[in-house]
Image (cartoon, rainbow, N blue to C red):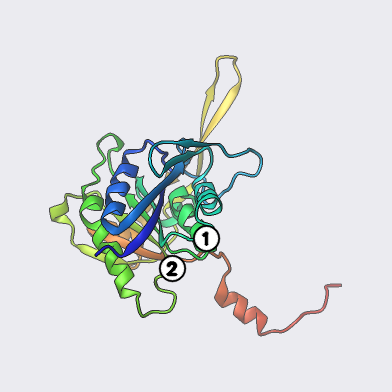
Amino acid sequence: MKPFGRILLTNDDGIDAPGLKVAEDIAAQLAEEVWVVAPEHDQSGVGQGISLHTPLRVYHHGERRFAVSGTPADCVMFAMAEWFEEEAPDLVLSGVNCGANLSDSVMYSGTVGAVLAAAHLGLPGIALSQAFVDRAAIDYAPTTRYAAGLIRELWQAGADRDGYQRACWNINFPDLPVAELRGSRFTRQIGGGIAGPRLVHGTDGRGLAYHWLSFERRPSSIDHPQSDVVALRDGHISVMPLQPTRCDDVLADKCFEQGDRPLPR
């Protein structure tokens, strides 16, 4: 029996991305009905951003398949407003991303941004990402083999836990042959994967300068045993719970205990 009645599927690599087809096959194993609402073009790195200064245009790509001229979060918001206002999907699934979303990269990820947008609407969400060493030879076999089973386990394990099913999850699969995977591991986000911003400079055909923003990455510097980076390095699938708010709850509670403060002089 399939655990979900309806899954809403999106990504940040775009409607034609190979990883989206992988995710569609995974979703079909889990739900009676799958809707695909994905960006028209690649939206990697947009995080949880939404479009406020340009209108959204929607293009039909087949039965329950639509491309939106916006971000992954736009796709979730549009789908909820247009089709699911009365009957929401049981799960928002995002991916499968071409490349891992680990450490500092999580905050920039459009794949993760989609499930955070879902969480703001009270919907459970799961982001799936497949790590690679060579972009031209990415192998989705680990995700294809184990994603559906992991999602089933998360859902069943959370049946009696308050908030567990309603959480959003960031799942990353290592770039290893299926036979070499060692298991899955619950992880947390440990910073340090991005050492700093870098610029790649160029000049266009009119002689005007342009600049590509990139990052210097140092994942090898991360050695915390709970880190998602270490989990993949050890041959494990990383399963990380996320929260949609950015408030430091521990610090906020401590500050609240101090009571109201007078205005500064």
Residue density around tag 2, few if under 14, some if 14–19, many if 20 or more, within 10 Å: many
Residue 241, picture quadrant = bottom left
Name the residue tied to disc 2: 167
Instruction: Measuring from the top left, give residue 84's x and y in whole percent.
Output: 50, 56
Q: Which residue is located at x 38 percent, y 37 percent? A: 62
Q: Which of disc 2 and disc 1 is earlier in sequence?
A: 1
Q: Is residue 19 above or below residue 113?
A: above
Against 6, residue 160 (above or below) is below
Q: Please give the name of the residue rendered at 27% of the width and 38% of the height, measured from the top-left corner.
A: 134
State whether residue 233 appears in this view. Answer: no
Residue on which disc 1 sits: 86
- Which label is found at residue 128? none
Q: Which residue sits furthest right?
A: 265
Q: Nearer the viewer, mark 1 or mark 2?
A: 1
Q: Quadrant of the N terminus?
A: bottom left
From the viewer's side, name the closer residue of 64 and 37: 64
